[in-house]
Image: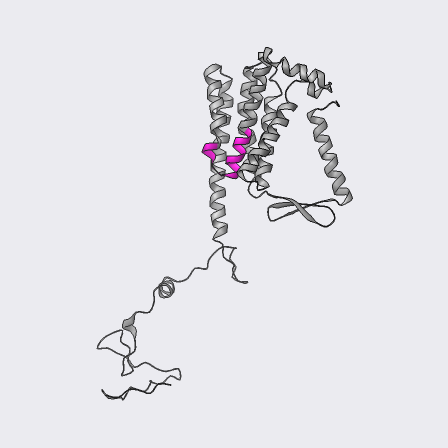
Amino acid sequence: MPQVNPATVALLLLAAAFGGWATGLLRIRHEDGRLAIRLWRSGHLGASFDLRDGWLLLGLTLAMGWSVAAAVERSAWAPGTDGRLIPALALATLAGWIFVAAGLSRLVYLLASLGAGLITLVLFTPSPLLSGSSLAVVRKWLFDLPSQPNLVLLMGLVLMFIGAGLWASWWVYGRRNGLVALLPSGTILAVEILNDPSPGLYFFTIFWLATAAGVLLRLNYVARKQGWRARRLPHGRGTGRRSGALPRLPARAARAQATPEPASRARRGDGTDARRPGRGRPVRDAAGGPEPQDRTGPGQSRAED
């Protein structure tokens, strides 16, 4: 089997993307917060990613996960955790962010997360799979795995952080629920504080609290921003107002537009306005003169046009 490592996989993916773009088989276009990837020369849409209002949230989520993974690596719950938990959590968070940006449903996201988690586990677990060993060696390693508790614990930690990253991505970017997204990382950090009361954990705790508050505040701002964008109305040229701003009307004009004409303001039969009983004024026509009064008797009716 060929030798595989994370750097080789990333290099192969980057080379494939550059080759597709250079030959015209892969076209990338970013417009109005959406990244469209079109395949083949016919311009068939391969994938579309909604990147609007997601970059700062992604950075805060990665920073929050880093604080927890760094604290666990510092305590060394299992031998060999150095340099494995942080990249595993970061890769899982990025994969979940890409899945949500692509608009995958819940079931498809779950299936894609299983595949991404398995690949990440293989990349960050010391095993013969990454050294190019034969199938017989890999089979023997799998059978001997129950007799290696430290390795099993390491794989469990890697899986736990992979799940935490995918969970955070789904609830932050897909559901916009920050409190639920904080549950895995907050629980892991709480267990870490109980098991290791060293003063060095104060920094990671404060850093996690700051980034978690940033995630919640950013989600609140994004929700309000989306509400403003949904209520935005077009405006005419020359108004001098920003997009979405409604022109201010005088209070009297606004009340006049909002209040319908009451029935008491109907014109009387003698051509006067009925707004003030006993003080009626003649209503003038469009030419400026008073309108002709109604001369019909009690038993007569006016001819309609």
Horizontally, residue 186 falls left or right of residue 117, namely left
Q: From what the image shows, is residue 142 above or below residue 178?
A: above
| Residue 174 lies within the magenta run | yes
Magenta range = 165-180
| Residue 280 lies within the magenta run | no
Q: Nearer the viewer, residue 212 or 161?
A: 161
Q: Quarter-wise, where is residue 280 in the image?
A: bottom left
Q: Residue at x 51, y 22 (%)?
A: 203
Q: From what the image shows, is residue 240 above or below residue 15?
A: below
Q: Residue lying furthest top in this view?
A: 147
Q: Nearer the viewer, residue 55 or 283?
A: 55
Residue 167 visible in the current orientation: yes
The quarter of the rendered structure image containing the C terminus is bottom left
Count of all numbered marks drawn on residues in the image: 0
Residue 133: image location, x then y, percent: 73, 18
Secondary structure character of the magenta stretch overall: helix
Q: Residue at x 37, y 82 (%)?
A: 285
The quarter of the rendered structure image containing the N terminus is top right
Residue 295: image location, x then y, percent: 27, 89
Q: Residue at x 47, y 19 (%)?
A: 191
Horizontally, residue 228 falls left or right of residue 85, namely left
Q: From what the image shows, is residue 20 above or below residue 190?
A: below
Residue 85: image location, x then y, percent: 59, 22
Horizontally, residue 8 falls left or right of residue 148, namely right
Q: From what the image shows, is residue 193 above or below residue 60?
A: above
Residue 197 visible in the current orientation: no
Residue 137: image location, x then y, percent: 70, 15
Q: How is the image coloured?
A: one colour
